[in-house]
Image (spheres, grey):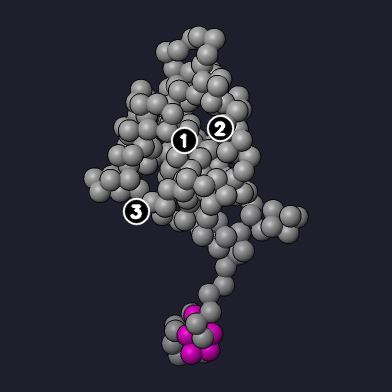
Amino acid sequence: MVSSNTELAYNSKIEGEVIVSRADAVINWIRTNSMWPMPMGLACCAIELMGVGASRFDIARFGAEVMRFSPRQADCMIVAGTVTYKMASAVRRIYDQMAGPKWVIAMGACASSGGMYRSYATLQGVDRIVPVDVYVSGCPPRPEALLDALMKLQDKVKRERSAKNLLSA
């Protein structure tokens, strides 16, 4: 008969300072809490994107305060604003230069669907040139909406199979 319930539980004297987890869970926890956005501020939504880095909204709470203007150092592109056909090739080139894994947030009505612009010069959604993970609605969307999109992206990253991708690379 066991005299104490503590013998059946985790014993730090026997186990030491060891934590057991799955590789997917650890890798995704690291990726989730250290996303480095590549801001693609193309129009008025860029002002709201700038606001999310200020102290009032503080994107640093989510580990995404390190805005990288070098695609090789970023893993989350935030396309904020109207994408014209003239800019589309530049957006695609920057996306291609980002190291994997990489994610995209389409911020605002213009980036998501072309917005109110139905013209020959406006791309009707950035998802025609890059794969989009999260869409943010609004014209322009509030900073809280971008933070919500970031939390949705973090939830998506938590569910990914990362160890399998590392082994096959």
Residue at x-position 63% and y-position 40%: 96
Question: As drawn, is 79 to the left or to the right of 51?
Answer: right
**Which sits in the foreground, 136 or 13?**
136
SS category of the residue bearing label 2: helix
- Tell me, yes or no, whether the two marked residues, 2 and 1, touch with CB atoms within 8 Å: yes
Q: Position of residue 151 (x, y in %)?
A: 42, 45
Above or below 23: residue 120:
above
Give the residues in magenta: 10-15
Residue at x-position 33% and y-position 34%: 48
Mark 2 vs mark 3: give the one in front: 2
Task: Determine which residue is flagged by label 2.
Answer: 91
Above or below 82: residue 120:
above
Residue at x-position 60% and y-position 24%: 128
SS category of the residue bearing label 3: helix
Residue 97 highlighted magenta (yes or no): no
Q: Residues within 10 Å of mark 3 (few under 14, many from 20)?
A: few
Residue sitting farthest toward the left? 56
- Tell me, yes or no, whether the two marked residues, 2 and 3, touch with CB atoms within 8 Å: no
